Each structure stands twice: as C-alpha cells, then as structure tokens.
Image (cartoon, rainbow, N blue to C red):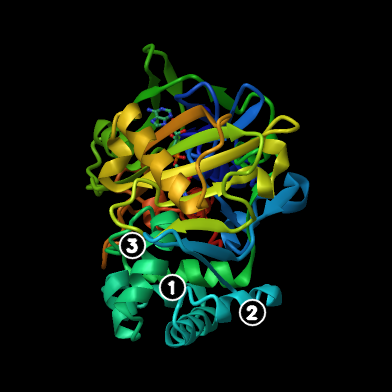
Amino acid sequence: MTERIVVVGGGVAGLVCARVLQAAGRDVLLFERDAEIGGRVRTRRVDGFSIDRGFQVAFEAYPTLGRHVDWRALDMRWFAPAGRICTADGRTTLVGDALADPTLLWPTLTQGGLSWGDLWRVLRLRRDAVRRRFEECFAPATLGRSTRDYLAGLGVTPRGIARFFAPFYGGILLDRSLETSASVLLYTFKMLAEGRTGVPRAGMGALSAQMAAGLRPGTLRTGIPVAGVTVRDGAVRGVTLADGTAIEATAVVLATEAPALAKLAESAGSSVTVPTETRGVTTCYFASRTPVLPGRALWLNAAEPATVSHAVTVTEVAPEYAPTGWHLLATNTVGSAAALPDEGLLAGVRADVSRMSGRPLPEDLRVVAIERVPLAQVAQPPRATQAQVPVRTEVPGLVFASELWHSSSLEGAARAGEAAAAALIGTDRPA
Ligand SMILES: Cc1cc2nc3c(=O)[nH]c(=O)nc-3n(C[C@H](O)[C@H](O)[C@H](O)COP(=O)(O)OP(=O)(O)OC[C@H]3O[C@@H](n4cnc5c(N)ncnc54)[C@H](O)[C@@H]3O)c2cc1C
C-alpha cells in the first residue's frame, strides 16, 4: 500500500500541514471541496476590485503563521495602529498606539476619545500582554474570564469599554458583546503591540496562494469534496470522494472547518464534539471616486444599535484593491444584524457610514459586493479557547488539524496544521 497522506481542506490549516509534511519528504495529496484553495482566506475580482472573503487582516507578529509566509514577497500594505471612534452624536476621535507610531500621541491625548485614566489602563494592558509569553496569555486566570469582566477588573470604565473595546473587538473577534475569553483579548493585544497588521497588495487570498505555490505540482486537487474516511482493520486506509472514487492513504488529516470535521470524523468511527456557536460577519464593499472614510486607521462605530461595527477604506492602505481613480470601502456588520436581508442591511449601513463620515454620502457611491460569512470564527467563550478539538485521535492514521486546537484565528489554523504534521512525522515542532 502507498505511503501517501491525504489532507482534507485547503484553508490555512491544511496548507500549512501539507507544506510541513512535504518538507519532511512525505507524499501528500490535498483535497479541497471548493474550486479555489484558501478557505476563509480568499480574494475574488469583481469589476477590477479585489474582494476579500470578508474584511480580514493578517497580523505580522503571529509566530507560527510567520514561518509559512514571506511578508516581503506579499508586498504587504500596513494599517495605522489606530482606531477612529465615532459616537452617536457624530463626533470622531482618534485613539492610537503611540509606542508604535509616536505621531499618534498628540491626537490620542488631546482628542478625548478615551479618558486619560482609560488610556493609562490600556497602556498597562498592553505592557502586561507584551511581557507574557504567548502561552501565558492562556493561563487559567484569563482563560476563564470574559473580556468584559477582565476589562472591568482592570478598572476600564463602562464608557471606555463601550467606545473603544466593543467596536474594536467587534472588529477583531466579531463579538461586540465582549463575551469572548480574556485570553483572546490578551494574545491579540500582544500581537497588535508586537507587529503590524495589514493586507497583501493582491488581497488576502495572496497569502493562501503563496502557501500553495510552495507545494509540489499535483499535490492540490480543488473542486473535490471528500465524503468520508475509510477505515479497515481498525486503521485508516484512505478517503472516499463525493463521486465515489476511493483514494488510498496510510494517514488522513482532517483540516476542514469544525462542523465538516465532526462529520468526516464520524465516518471514521471517531467522535468529536465541536462548538456550534459561530461568529459571522457581513462585509459590504462600496466603490466611490473619493474615500468616504479616509485614512489608514480602522473606523469604529461606538453607537448602539450598530449596523456597521467597523469600517475602512481599504484603498487608503492598499490602492491596488481598486482600479485607478477608484476607492473601495469595506463596512462590517456583526451579530444578528449580519443576517439582515440586503435591502435592510444596506439602508442601515448607509445611514451609519453617513453619520460616521459626518457628510451625506457621495452620489457615485455604489455597491460592488456583499460578502456574507456565517462562519468567520468559532465563538471562544471563557474556558473554551484551547484544545477544543484534539490533534491525535483514537483511530490509527487519523489526525485533526482544526484551528480549535488553539484558537479560531489564522495563527490557530497554522498551529493546528503544524501540530497535525508533527503528529504524523513524529517530530515535536514547537506549536
Ligand atoms: C471575515 C473574516 C475575518 C477574520 N478576521 C480574522 C482576523 O482578523 N485575525 C485572525 O487571525 N483570523 C481572522 N479570521 C479567522 C481566520 O480566517 C480563520 O480562523 C482561518 O482562516 C481558519 O483556517 P482553517 O484552515 O482552519 O479553516 P478554513 O479556512 O475554513 O478551511 C477549511 C477548508 O476545508 C474545506 N472543506 C470543508 N469540507 C470539505 C470536504 N468535505 N472536502 C474537502 N474540503 C473540505 C473548505 O472548503 C475550506 O476551504 C477571520 C475570518 C473571516 C472569514
């Protein structure tokens, strides 16, 4: 029997896993259900605009992801380390990380976005996050608490939480309620403090494409859903494709999103419970000749109720996202409003953007695309952020590469990919 390893799923987790296995000399075949690889990290072209599968940024400081991408070759475009807070009364104030960019000090101190007391508390949170090692962010004391509870414990005022943390983490964790574990708050704060956030010149999909380009020709099989895992005599023997074709393999890595993973695992007689609560986002992309929300900082909507949680004119950071002379605005809606039908959604988005910009919307503003991503991240409530899905299983030859082994993030997916490969090649890579 062939010594082949099959990887199911061509998102970041599957691509990282395939890369590590191949580097270790293994024969790998990766099956991806969709016509393109990348999973949640994809970009399509619409009328000359680059449309990411929901607005998303890459964190330069992610340690594991960084081992698998070449930021320079991606020609990254970096955001300002700042947020522009927009309140219900139409005022906007800039709050930024002056340690990363000293020009942000003056506006942050003088515009009153956060009180001086809250700025001091945010600075202490930043210092604490930087001092911790990555894994220390997941210590039981933080893992078991919600972000809201943790911030209140630090003395951050309800005003500071409502104006800054709710819309900012509405952006990062797609959760304005701040019920996500404080561990995620800490490690994302650490990543923000230790590196830049940005998008590749050619769109987020370039990140997946770059990873895929490192694989040997013939490794990737796209547009081919795997229907089940074949187990004989108590061990994995391969997979069955949706068209009934049997593919032999000595090991199978399930690198799909959690619900598909649970189903495929069941076909192999392995039972895994995956969380069902997901965080969805709907990104509306608009074109206009002038930038509606200018600048390289994220615009944060601190008003409630909010249709737009956060927004940014992507072309202010990466002009290549639009044809010459055009701008591309990305607005993001999270929570129950993300499921509004197009008409109601767009009406709410337009009203929020107009208030945030402080002007009537330009007449040439038009919708380019609406990206609905119901499963952008899995909910990460207190106590549930790590090892929700294991790497090793009780079935010999069956391994999981789920982001939920670590965290629902690009880093979590990369870690799971490395760990799954390590489990098969018998090494102990840091993960
Ligand atoms: C809009 C948005 C914003 C985000 N923001 C951030 C952020 O700011 N920072 C951050 O770190 N993370 C963010 N994330 C989350 C991050 O993108 C994901 O955590 C990560 O990409 C998950 O990668 P994955 O490989 O585990 O899963 P996926 O990307 O979901 O890949 C799984 C793949 O498996 C394939 N598949 C499923 N079933 C089968 C089958 N039966 N046969 C073959 N293939 C199958 C799917 O088609 C898919 O391609 C965001 C995600 C979105 C969508």
Q: CA distance from mark 2 to mark 3?
A: 37 Å
Say whether mark 3 is within 8 Å of ligand 1: no
Foreground pick, 394 / 146: 146
The amino acid marked with disc number 2 is Trp
Find residue 152 and report its horizontal and vertical position in percent. 29, 80
Q: Is residue 24 left or right of residue 222?
A: right
Q: Check disc 1 and report the residue beneath it.
A: 186
Of the two numbered discs 2 and 3 on the same chain, state the one appearing first in sequence.
2
Q: Check disc 2 and report the residue beneath it.
A: 106
Question: Which is in the foreground here, disc 2 or disc 3?
Answer: 2
Q: Is residue 253 left or right of residue 318?
A: left
Q: Is residue 231 left or right of residue 366?
A: left
Q: Check disc 3 and report the residue beneath it.
A: 385
Quadrant assignment, res 388: bottom left
The amino acid marked with disc number 1 is Leu
Q: Are marks 2 and 1 in contact (CB under 8 Å)?
A: no
Of the two numbered discs 3 and 1 on the same chain, state the one appearing first in sequence.
1
Find residue 370 and report its horizontal and vertical position in percent. 45, 30
Name the residue at 48% across, 39% down: 54
Residue 430 visible at all: no
The amino acid marked with disc number 3 is Thr
SS for callout 1: helix
